[in-house]
Image (cartoon, grey):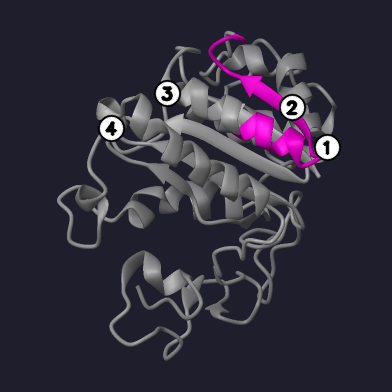
């Protein structure tokens, strides 16, 4: 398989840097072709602004979605964005790797998504009608490909459990897994999460590294999270609400959108 790993940590000698190297080495050992986008090393521009859309008239009001649509359709996106889109089309698997900062991805990675996920590429795709609301949530440009997260967190695993004070890790990562990866069509694998990383010593690193190696070895066979397909019949269109009676007993919130979710 062809794998793109987008790496978002400012220190290459960090634990994240070591885990990135473990993942890349294991993927290559399994015969996969790997490319790495290192956002900090590349000096990635994270903010969306007029400079992203050279085809926008100087006196035009800047509407980001409309400008993105026009530039994408005209082949007028900036070279750095086009290069990342080409990598996404090339890759069979996308891995986003980042430390969990303030319950979210670092701003530089969010900026990668904001700029690379152009209108017409990752959203605004497909017909909108009374029976179909675009190609998204299980369909879209990146359908048929796989994606997963590699995430490090300073808190304990218990802090991110179902009753943990930080909230369940699956809920914290839902906006990324469902809203960023599943939205344009990816089959999303369960995330790899390493906790208490600020206290991890050399002896503690190897079990984490081996767990990551195993995830890389099973990249092609791990069942994806069974998110409901938007156009698969589970949602009322155009309200985009789950049809009554499909939810598991007691399920609310994000769990409603996982088929057969029970925890």
Is residue 100 visible in the rendered structure shown here? Answer: no
Is residue 213 visible in the rendered structure shown here? Answer: yes
Report how far apart the C-alphas of labels 2 and 4 lie in the structure: 28 Å
Badge nearest the viewer, 2 or 4: 2
State the residue at coordinates (67%, 36%).
Answer: 26
| Residue 35 shown in magenta | yes
Report how far apart the C-alphas of labels 3 and 1 lie in the structure: 28 Å
> Where is residue 138 drawn, in percent x and y?
66, 63
- Sequence-first tag of 4 and 3: 3
Label pair 2/4, CB-CB below 8 angstroms: no
Badge nearest the viewer, 1 or 2: 2
Report how far apart the C-alphas of labels 1 and 4 lie in the structure: 32 Å
Which quadrant does the N terminus fall into?
top right
Q: Which residue is mark 4?
A: 102
Q: Which residue is mark 1?
A: 90
Which element type, helix, strand or loop, lies under badge 1?
A: helix
- Sequence-first tag of 3 and 1: 3
The magenta-colored residue range is: 23-42
Badge nearest the viewer, 4 or 3: 3
Label pair 1/4, CB-CB below 8 angstroms: no
Label pair 3/1, CB-CB below 8 angstroms: no
């Amino acid at each position: 398989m062809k794998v793109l790993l987008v790496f978002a940590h400012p220190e290459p000698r960090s634990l994240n840097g070591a885990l990135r190297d473990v993942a890349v080495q294991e993927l290559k050992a399994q015969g996969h072709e790997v490319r790495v986008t290192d956002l900090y090393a590349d000096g990635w521009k994270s903010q969306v602004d007029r400079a992203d859309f050279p085809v926008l008239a100087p006196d035009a009001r800047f509407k980001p979605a409309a400008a993105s649509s026009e530039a994408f359709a005209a082949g007028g996106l900036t070279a750095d964005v086009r290069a990342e889109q080409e990598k996404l089309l090339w890759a069979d698997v996308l891995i986003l790797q980042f430390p969990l900062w303030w319950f979210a991805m670092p701003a530089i990675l969010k900026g990668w998504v904001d700029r690379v996920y152009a209108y017409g590429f990752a959203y605004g795709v497909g017909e909108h009608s009374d029976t179909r609301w675009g190609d998204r949530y299980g369909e879209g440009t990146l359908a048929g490909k796989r994606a997963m997260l590699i995430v490090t967190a300073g808190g304990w695993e218990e802090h991110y459990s179902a009753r943990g004070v930080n909230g369940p890790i699956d809920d914290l990562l839902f906006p990324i897994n469902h809203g960023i990866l599943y939205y344009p069509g990816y089959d999303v694998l369960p995330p790899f999460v390493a906790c208490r990383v600020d206290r991890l010593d050399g002896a503690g690193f190897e079990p984490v590294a081996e767990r990551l190696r195993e995830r890389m070895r099973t990249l092609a066979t791990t069942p994806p999270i069974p998110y409901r397909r938007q156009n698969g019949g589970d949602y009322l269109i155009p309200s985009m609400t789950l049809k009554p009676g499909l939810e598991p007993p007691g399920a609310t919130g994000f769990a409603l959108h996982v088929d057969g979710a029970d925890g």
